[in-house]
Amino acid sequence: MNEVILKVQGMTCGHCVMAVKKALGKVPGVTHVEVDLPAGKAVVQGGASVEAMIKAVAQAGYGADVKG
Ligand SMILES: [Cu+2]
């Protein structure tokens, strides 16, 4: 199983966390999502493409980038 850590910009509260979580959860292939608000990151597990994850987060209104 793949694990991707995304840096997410623009999250300020629990609502943002839920929105990002929901957006990433809808990406085909994603099996599990953990969002860390204070760290501004999302840990995504599954076989989805990183491009699709970033696009999904962007469509939810947040910025995403591959961490590292
Ligand atoms: Cu919020």
Image: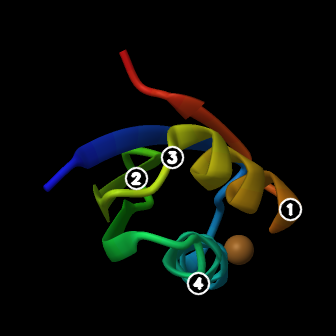
Residue that mark 4 sits on: 22
Q: Secondary structure at mark 3?
A: loop
- Horizontal side, residue 4 vs residue 12: left or right: left
* Label of residue 49 in the image: 3
The image quadrant where one finds ligand 1 is: bottom right
**Residue sitting at 58 percent across and 84 percent down?**
22
Quarter-of-image position of residue 43: bottom left
Task: Give the residue drawn at x 75%, y 50%.
Answer: 55
Q: Nearer the viewer, mark 3 or mark 4?
A: 3
Q: Earlier in the sequence, mark 3 or mark 1?
A: 3
Q: Secondary structure at mark 4?
A: helix
Mark 4 crowd level (few <14, some 14–19, many ≥20, 10 Å Cα): some
Q: Are marks 3 and 4 in contact (CB under 8 Å)?
A: no
Q: Position of residue 40 (x, y in %)?
A: 47, 46
Above or below: residue 41 compared with residue 59: above
Marks 2 and 3 in Cβ contact (< 8 Å): no
Residue type pointed to by label 3? Ser
Q: Position of residue 52 (x, y in %)?
A: 65, 51
- Element marked by disc 2: loop
28 on left or right of 52: left
- From the viewer's side, name the closer residue of 68 and 53: 53
